Amino acid sequence: MAAKILANLIVMGSGILARAVVQAYHQALTNALKTGVAQETIQNGVHRASKIMTEQEARQILGITEQSTWEEIAQKYDNLFENNAKNGSFYLQSKVHRAKECLEPLYQHKGQGTTT
């Protein structure tokens, strides 16, 4: 008998809690729409998600010029990647990796090896 009462209390309590969460979510959306925060967040999120690293940005991250060879790029990449792996940040390490990925196709088209 006590188990049945306890089960009913749990079911009723979870139902009440679920409705409260849904109401709070709807109220938060309403408030966000009134202040324009939702639109700004959506626009910034879409803009950031679609941003692709440019060749110039990749060269700046690796600290190279347009005249740099693939070997120089690979050496810079290895140094920066290892330094950030040891005592840097994962974010910077990721940026270094993306920079190398961005430049790799350019050097494949030039006929330089990209075995590193």
Image (cartoon, rainbow, N blue to C red):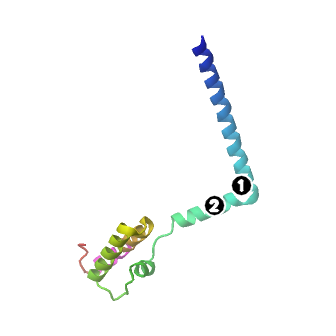
Most extreme residue toward the top, as rendered? 1
Amino acid at circle 2: Thr
Residue 6, picture quadrant: top right
Residue 76, picture quadrant: bottom left
Residue 61 rendering spot, x and y as whole percentages: 42, 78
Tag 2 secondary structure: helix
The residue at the point 68 percent across, 31 percent down is 16
Vertical placement of 105 versus 1: above or below?
below
Residue 15, picture quadrant: top right
Q: Which residue is mark 1?
A: 32
Position of the N terminus, as image quadrant, is top right
Earlier in the chain: of badge 1 and badge 2, it is 1
Whether tag 1 and tag 2 are in contact, CB under 8 A, the answer is yes
Q: Is residue 87 magenta?
A: no
Q: Residues within 10 Å of mark 1 (few under 14, many from 20)?
A: some
Residue 42 rendering spot, x and y as whole percentages: 62, 60
Decide whether the magenta segment is chiefly helix, strand or loop: helix
Residue 38 rendering spot, x and y as whole percentages: 67, 57
Vertical placement of 65 versus 98: above or below?
below
Which of the pair 27/2 is nearer the observer?
A: 2
Vertical placement of 2 versus 23: above or below?
above
Most extreme residue toward the right, as rendered? 34
Q: Which residues are magenta?
A: 102-109
Badge number at residue 41: 2
Q: Residues within 10 Å of mark 2 (few under 14, many from 20)?
A: few
Q: CA distance from mark 1 to mark 2?
A: 10 Å
The residue at the point 63 percent across, 30 percent down is 14
The residue at the point 43 percent across, 70 percent down is 92
Tag 1 secondary structure: helix
Which of the pair 96/65 is nearer the observer?
A: 96
The residue at the point 60 percent across, 13 percent down is 2
Position of the C terminus, as image quadrant, is bottom left
